[in-house]
Image: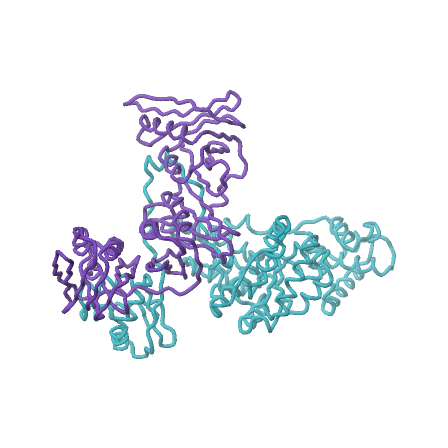
Amino acid sequence: MKLECEIEKIKNGIFIVERITGKNLTLPALNSILLIASNKSLKLRSTNLSLGVEIEIPARVEKEGVVAVSGAVLSGVFLNIPEVGNVKIDGADGNLSIKTKNTNIKLKGQPHDDFPTIPTVSGKVFEIEAKKLTEGIKSVYYSSSPSDIKPEISSVYIYTNEDNLVFVSTDSFRLAEKKIKIKGLEEIHGLLLPFKNVSEILRIFDDTRGVVKVCFNKNQISFSSDNIYLTSRIIDGNFPDYRQIIPKETKTEAILLRQDLLNALKLANVFSDKFNQVNLTIKPREKFFELSSANSDIGENKTYLEAAAKGESIELGFNYKYFLDCFQSISSDSVSIKLSGNSRPMIISPVADQSFTYLIMPMNR
Amino acid sequence: MNTGELWKNCLVEIEAGISKANFSTWFKNTSVLREDAGIIYVGVPNEFVRDWLKNKYHKLITKTVAGAYENMRAVEYIITKIESEKHESPMTADAYINKELPLKDLYINQEDNLNPRYRFNSFIVGAFNELAYAASQAIIESPGTKYNPFFVYGGTGLGKTHLIQAVGNTIKEKYPDKKVHYLTLEKFATDFINALQNNKANTFKEKYRKYDLLIIDDIQFIGKMEKIQEELFHTFNTFHENNKQIIFSSDKHPNYIPELADRLKSRFAAGMIVDISEPEYESRLAILKVKLREQNVDLGQEVIEYVASTIQGNVRELEGSLNTIVCQYRLKNKAVSLSEVKNLLKNNIRPKKNIAIKDVVKTVSGYYKLEEASIYEKTRRKEIVKARQVVMYLLREDFNVSYPLIGQKIGGKDHTTVIHSCLKIKEDIKNDPQLLQELEQIRIMFK
């Protein structure tokens, strides 16, 4: 193969696909990036057998061909080419030569026969703006369970409800739900994106503008934009019936400023014990809202906060980490906390924004 | 043929032919799922593996399998879920203090609402349900044309839901592009009301009309819902016109669903109406045997026969009783003797009905909308005579009251009059299904 392309473009492509090359896998082909030159473009492909990605770069192809080279080495090479302009790539006998104005590199190739194909998915298709897709995933994925014991919840669950595409994640201690309004979406009964692949999907499409075409069936999903094709396995299973655990009636409700709450939580964190426990006391009649934490080795703290509260008095403990996590999805100035007893989940949501809901289970006391 | 053994042998051979790295990457977690008419179905963990086996190793696999199994015609690859070993996470202090959200697992398919557990291979066919079974098979053969609608009725716990869901599951498998949907009438009604409240009546119509097979369970509650009847009527017509199958289940014959609009009644009757009755002894025996095989427990013939002969109610009660015994068996880890079983089931057996004659008269006269006292009167008015005969028949058949005692209590009649009445009803029900239905209805009131 013989071709010429822009350094900047191939560099970005390599950095993306290199992340997905397998590590510690028995098959050496999986550690490599496959370069395919054909029909006016260069394709870079890599897979770890859970996720597969292919990026197309415009190139002037003189001779078509295929070469596989180690992903780590290739990204190491391009990381240290500071030049701009064009690069000439030449592959013969399975080896690769890379030439820029000032550098001349020769790389040993890998046998590309062992490099697997990546599945082309056929099934239901829908289109979504890349920005909305990443926003939906970003708003919830940190709540997924990182453990493999229950694959159904080590995932981001996506389904449609009327005009919304709903994203949900839970690790069974807390739960995040984000609704994104999209008109004219065909019904999706639920698909489970594996948590381990979600961060790569986010990274790859984070600065994609325009529309992503999504295609999925029972086992596999693909996302394609102008020059990127990404495919991931999906989890065959059922997400728990989470809607029924969202308490319908509220006994205590408090609204307070996001920044006040955030500061108080960070302070409480300094004193929290090994279980990350922070206590919350609300007495609406006395206009009393307090966050406190104590640690026998360090000391203790109490913070009073300005809050508009109504309903019954309540006292409960929770893990502050779970609480802090949800602030990455809340951008409004004020936050609402709804409670219905200290054995039922606490609901946190931005004021005047129905699209995000976050549940935290209180701690046993 | 043992497919597990076959695949193991093949793997040994394949391993010798390719590099170790390739073998462990591509053949780990594969298995032979089943063999069907010479086609070997190989289960693989994901699409990456399926594509690669198909593209790269198909020849090798086919050749190896053919060498080990001469009847092989083809090899197909199917993606299967690997049951990862369930690790129960140890109860740590951390897990104790962090309470979990009370999330429940979902076992029901969200797309069509069917429970995948309900299949025909666990469905026992006996005299009590063979007509319903045969009809359901005909529907699976040609959905929408043969018996449309298909209306199943029968008492609680006799397997109506199992039957209609099994039809749904089978049709889904046989015709993968048909859209199947199962729901209870209650769900249909709440959906409809929600749609009305949100001014989305059209979305509601579209939602249900896009299915190819609609299964509605527990339709008997439709009686008092006039609006729902109307909506169901229109949905039904759309289905019928487009030759799409619709299946209903109910605990009563449509004629006895109170306040059911005539137009729906006649629509129901246009297809096939079948009943499932209580299983007879042989079927009960068969059901028990299948349940035991599922649980991998052997209780001995004597015990099974005893359970089958004493628990005469519905299948659900039968299962409940069996579970009690199996639980005891597991606990003790040894065979359960007949006397122990008798002791265990003491509470499950329905007590012999002791009922005051007066109550029977009250129920029957109430059912026929007559004055209670008129039964005791010496009158030959036709409707009263009939009710009186039904009282006598029920007292004799169901409650084992002696002929002379019945005569004495019901207006001082001779015992031969009573015998005549009983015989007359017995004869009449053979020719008059209406009367049989009436008796069934009355009997339900005694339960």
What x and y, as percent, mark residue B195?
A: 61, 52
Q: Is residue B73 above or below residue A293?
A: below
Q: Quadrant of the C terminus of chain A?
A: top left
Tell me how the rendering is colored. by chain
**Left-right relation of B213 to B433:** left
Res. A21 visible in picture: no
Indicate the quadrant where residue B134 lies: bottom right
B270 above or below A179?
below
Percent across and percent down for residue A53 are 30, 59
With respect to residue B124, does A297 lie above or below?
Answer: above
Q: Which chain's colour is cyan?
A: B
* Residue placed most toward the observer, B422 or B222: B222
Residues B362 and A358: in front is: A358
Marks counted in the figure total 0
Would you place residue B332 above or below residue B295 in this image? Answer: above
Q: Looking at the image, can residue B75 be seen?
A: yes
Residue B394, image x and y in percent?
72, 57
In the rendered image, residue A124, in percent from the top left (x then y), is placed at 44, 62
Which of the pair B365/B204 is nearer the observer? B204
**At 69% from the left edge and 53% from the top edge, which residue is drawn?**
B225
Q: Quadrant of the N terminus of chain A?
A: bottom left
Chain coloured purple: A
Quarter-of-image position of residue A277: top left
| Residue B272 in the figure: left or right of residue A244 | right
